[in-house]
Image: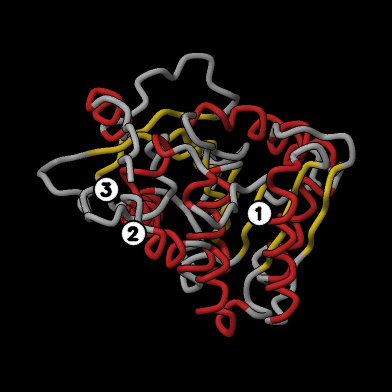
Amino acid sequence: MVPPILPSPDFYKYFNDFYIDTEYSGLPVNTQYKLYPQPSRAGTGLKGSALIYFPDGYDQGTERYPVLYWLHGGLANQRQGFWGVGLYHKAMTEGTMPKTIIVLVQALPVGWYADSKDGSRPIATIMTRDLVDYMDSTYRTIARREARWIEGFSMGGYGALHLAFGHPETYGAVSMIAGALLRRLEQEPIERTHDTFFDDQEYFTACHPITLLEKNGDALRNRTLVRLLSAELDTRQTEPIAAMQRNMERLKVPHKSIEIKGADRSYDSILAGTGSYAYEFWAEAAARMKIS
């Protein structure tokens, strides 16, 4: 058997070191660039970046807020979430979405929001421990699972489900947008998976959101608000997302699933295609978790 041809070491060095995005011009309204400590990584004083949106009035009061963590897609960065911040800011100012702190995370562009098999890139641990601890200790958050929400696009959609289903004690609501939910490693380009899963199908399966759903279904059922958004024209993900829906139904984990007719694989067209439900979902999360 001929071994796969991997990208150059320089390719992986660039993506494996991309914990900090140094480009942050043209930020959305009320959004600040921050560096936060990542003690879960091997080393001293290591940090990562995030863009944090603060709702109107944050600077003037003492109120505490829920936090929405937004996860970018593969080969992308924290700036991919700009459009969503604009949409959600407008909804907050109009009173149709609860005032919420939004964190656009910077994760490795090919990291899948999972801890790598060799332990050298503990992305899931950074997201669920380092970043959450930083937010709760630094800003006026509501430091409970019911007030921690997570949303992601493509690889970030996979990541949102991976984190929410793998850590039901941490997040109370999750929104997947066109999640990359293929279940065989060979279905994804090797340069996007190798340094996380190391060509190990068993580890890839163990990390997959469907596996974590099976493992933690009881903890998720009627406790975690879930929505699955997909695009009609994104046919490559049609069956994997349908498989997720079937498993959620079998395990009796309530969820809302919407396929946006005529939409392609772009998070703005999908989110815009949901209409007011784009932000009403978060109002539902607030009401359901009794924090609004």
Indicate the quadrant where residue 94 lies.
Answer: top right
Dot 3 falls on a residue whose secondary structure is loop
Separation of disc 2 and disc 1 at Cα? Answer: 20 Å
> What amino acid is labelled 2 in the image?
Arg
Secondary structure category for the residue under label 1 = strand
Q: Of 208 and 8, which appears nearest the observer?
A: 8
Q: Position of residue 205 (x, y in %)?
A: 46, 64
Q: Position of residue 27 (x, y in %)?
A: 53, 21
Residue closer to the observer: 80 or 206: 206
Q: Nearer the viewer, mark 2 or mark 1?
A: 1
Q: CA distance from mark 3 to mark 1?
A: 24 Å
**Mark 1 closeness class: few <14, some 14–19, many ≥20 residues within 10 Å:** many
Mark 3 → mark 2, Cα distance in angstroms: 14 Å
Residue 191 seen by the camera: yes
In the depicted structure, whether residue 19 falls above or below residue 99: above
Q: In this image, 46 relative to 230: left or right? A: left
- What residue appears at the point 50 percent right and 62 percent down from the top-left corner? 208
Secondary structure under the numbered disc 2 in the rendered image: helix
- Tell me what residue is drawn at x 78 percent, y 45 percent: 278
Residue placed under numbered mark 1 in the picture: 175
- Are the residues tagged 2 and 1 within 8 Å (C-beta)? no
In the rendered view of the protein, which quadrant contains the C terminus? Answer: bottom right
Residue under label 3? 121
The residue positioned 71% from the left and 34% from the top of the image is 265
User: Of the residues tagged 3 and 1, which is closer to the observer?
Assistant: 3
**What type is the residue that disc 1 sits on?**
Ser
Which residue in the structure is indicated by mark 2? 129
User: Reading the chain from its start, which is encountered first: label 3 or label 2?
Assistant: 3
Sequence-wise, which precedes: disc 2 or disc 1? Answer: 2
